[in-house]
Amino acid sequence: TTLEGSAARREQPAADSVFVRACRRQPVAHTPVWFMRQAGRSLPEYRKVRAGISMLEACRRPDLVAEITLQPVRRHGVDAAILFSDIVVPVAAAGIDLDIEPGTGPVIAEPIRTERDLERLRPLTPPDVSFVDEAVRLLVGELGATPLIGFAGAPFTLASYLVEGGPSRTHGKTKAMMYGQPELWHALCARLAEITLEFLRVQVAAGVSAVQLFDSWAGALSEADYRRFVLPHSAQVLSGLAEAGVPRIHFGVGTAQLLTAMGEAGADVVGVDWRTPLDAATALVGPERAVQGNLDPCVLFAPWPVVEREVRRVLAEGRAAPGHVFNLGHGVLPETEPEVLTRVVELVHEASAR
Ligand code: 1CP
């Protein structure tokens, strides 16, 4: 079905959109822009449709997923939509008892700490996530020429939630397993890589125009440990999608020391947080890959002249790259004024017009 998906996709205008072209380092009429976490609590229309519905339930309702995914496209005129879901959705579908708690994030009922625990993490089959297939098909129909980005969590970031049992500042238990029980660690990551790859294949077959692999917390590692304990598993996912023919974006936070390796893992586009200027990031990532980023999400709280200056700086530094997708350095914070995001989209389009 992946091949059928790619044949159908070549017919779609979204496959030749400004966003996909920039990911492929092809010439574009302007720099494309979208925002990580563009769908969510910064939008009153989101808070309205989510009222009384839990996060996981919302992710499992294709009509609601489609509505929430479309909201920022309608409001801001961004160049790409991102599927409304969460990185823990496929692990829940693969048998792990978890919840996404408001204000906290994913919470795992029984964390994975032993070989025995690993048995609870089954392989994922497409029927386990049929709601995602349905939501993507609905969206591709509605979005027309606007590309839809599919996504998944990378093995390290998913493992961190599963081993810690929830969000963690130090990833202490995760690293304890990585250093102390390397066989168990690699077995866990190999299983997560299979689940992630299957989850992304479902999205590609249903028609997404690109995928983003979120390794949000990989920045907690040195380059040597990343290469040894993490890269092979993320590469398994990214290389497994090579034939799918959609651009692959690879993103993490605090990854200045990892940008070269994250590109080598098999990405077409490397996502960069605000700590590394895009010209410096480009030197690390090389001419074979585009970059995505990297306005500090907190800049959006500053007066407009400051926002404008920072947007122009990011665009100028992005000109060093063979392809640039404008984004924030991490997700939109819930307190962000939606009007500022709309203005940023307009400014990026105007200031980058060629
Ligand atoms: O009730 C709510 O509204 C819960 C808040 C929320 C939302 C809106 C969570 C809980 N997840 C989401 C949606 C979500 N998660 C999207 C939506 C699509 C979009 O970008 O518009 C995406 C891409 C994610 C992916 C995700 N979830 C990541 C990777 C991206 C990142 O921010 O680094 C991570 C780390 C998560 C875990 C997670 N889920 C939710 C929270 C609050 C967290 C972070 C918890 C932590 O700090 O560890």
Image (tube, helix red, strand yellow):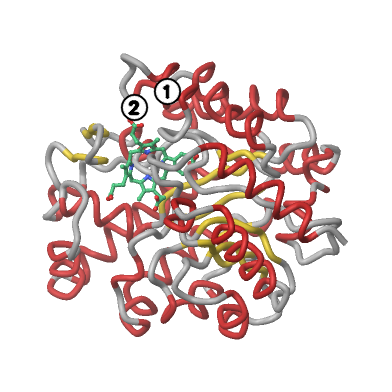
Q: Name the residue that disc number 1 marks.
A: 60
Q: What residue is drawn where x is 50% and y is 58%? A: 237
Image coords of residue 48 (percent x, y): 43, 17
Crowd rating for badge 2 (residues with CA inside 10 Å; few <14, some 14–19, many 20+): some
Image quadrant holding the N terminus, namely top right
In this rendering, the answer to whether 1 lies above or below 168 is above
Crowd rating for badge 1 (residues with CA inside 10 Å; few <14, some 14–19, many 20+): some
Frontmost residue, 281 versus 133: 281
Q: Amino acid at mark 1?
A: Arg
Q: Are marks 1 and 2 in contact (CB under 8 Å)?
A: yes
Do we see residue 53 in this rendering? Answer: yes
Q: What residue is drawn where x is 69% and y is 73%? A: 316
**Disc 1 and disc 2: Cα gap in Å?**
6 Å
**Would residue 82 appear left or right of 23 to someone viewing this image?**
left
Which quadrant of the figure has residue 120? top left
Q: Amino acid at mark 2?
A: Leu
Q: What residue is drawn where x is 42% and y is 23%? A: 60
Image coords of residue 203 (percent x, y): 58, 38
Do we see residue 245 in this rendering? Answer: no
Instruction: Check residue 56 in the rendering and tell me which mark sits there, or answer none.
Output: 2
Frontmost residue, 163 versus 40: 40
**Would residue 56 appear left or right of 66 to someone viewing this image?**
left
Q: How many numbered dots are placed on residues in this image?
A: 2
Image coords of residue 263 (percent x, y): 55, 73
